[in-house]
Amino acid sequence: MCSGCRPAPGRRRTVPESRPVQRRPLLDWRAVAVQRTLVLVKPDGVQRALIGEVIMRFERRGLHLVGLKLIRVERAVAERHYAEHAAKPFFAGLVDFITAAPVVAMVWEGPDAVAMVRTMMGATNPAAAAPGTIRGDHAVSIGTNVVHGSDSPERAAEELALFFEPAELVDWESSSARWLE
Ligand code: DAT
Ligand code: MG
């Protein structure tokens, strides 16, 4: 022990008593629902090396990642996923596109996560996608628009079940969680 570190004679160092970790939020204003939403980095995003770019945006925003995998989307899954567009003229091309090469499927969790992800993705029409959004920064075509995000909590629940087994979703607590609440 160095001489400067030595306690003065007759004095004892006191160690603060350990206290249980508090799990209360720092601020108690949470009123919005915590949601989970499905995000896909589409084949064009994977091919253009934008996987990290997409993940980084949601991660830095403070959303919580609970599922992640690189997959090829089977045709039957693609047809179910885009069933709402089955009657549209672009449907066949859309299914061809999403099954043409691997995608990254993710589940992100957070307050109002469904709407938050949609806002960060930007509009479907690239001309309307605001700069600063994923599509507004990285897409010029309505077809190849880098990302998919569920458009409602109900669709999010269906899409999660379509792309992930329950056991593939990981419950874990981020050490920064209480600084985001
Ligand atoms: P989003 O992906 O923003 O939820 P959507 O559900 O309306 O948009 O359409 C699904 C995808 O279909 C979209 O990401 C790109 C493609 N798509 C939509 N409208 C299209 C169009 N008019 N022509 C070609 N592709 C289109
Ligand atoms: Mg949609």
Image (spheres, rainbow, N blue to C red):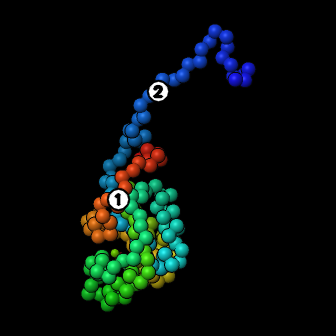
Instruction: Determine whether the beta carbon of the residue marked 1 sits less than 8 angstroms from the nearest atom of ligand 2.
Output: no
Residue 49's image quarter?
A: bottom right
- Disc 1 marks a residue whose amino acid type is Leu
Residue nearest the observer in this picture, 118 or 106: 106
Q: What is the quadrant of residue 40 in the picture? A: bottom left
Q: For residue 18, which numbered disc appears in the image?
A: 2
- Mark 2 lies on a secondary structure that is loop
Residue 180 at x, y percent in the picture: 45, 49
Q: Residues within 10 Å of mark 2 (few under 14, many from 20)?
A: few
Q: Is residue 104 left or right of residue 76?
A: right
Q: x and y percent of residue 114 in the render?
A: 35, 63
Q: Residue furthest bottom?
A: 89
Q: Is residue 127 visible?
A: no
Q: As shown in the figure, which amino acid type bears the numbered disc 2?
A: Ser
- Residue 29 vs 6, above or below: the answer is below
Q: Is residue 74 left or right of residue 46?
A: left
Mark identifier at residue 66: none
The residue at 47%/46% (across/down) is 175
Drawn side of residue 82 relative to residue 128, left or right = left
- State the residue at coordinates (49%, 75%): 46
Look at the numbered discs 2 and 1 and tell me whether their residues touch, using CB distance below 8 Å. no
Position of the N terminus by quadrant: top right
Question: Marks 2 and 1, how far apart in space?
Answer: 34 Å
User: Residue beneath label 1, please?
Assistant: 169
Q: Say which residue appears at 35% left-offset and 84% top-offset.
A: 95
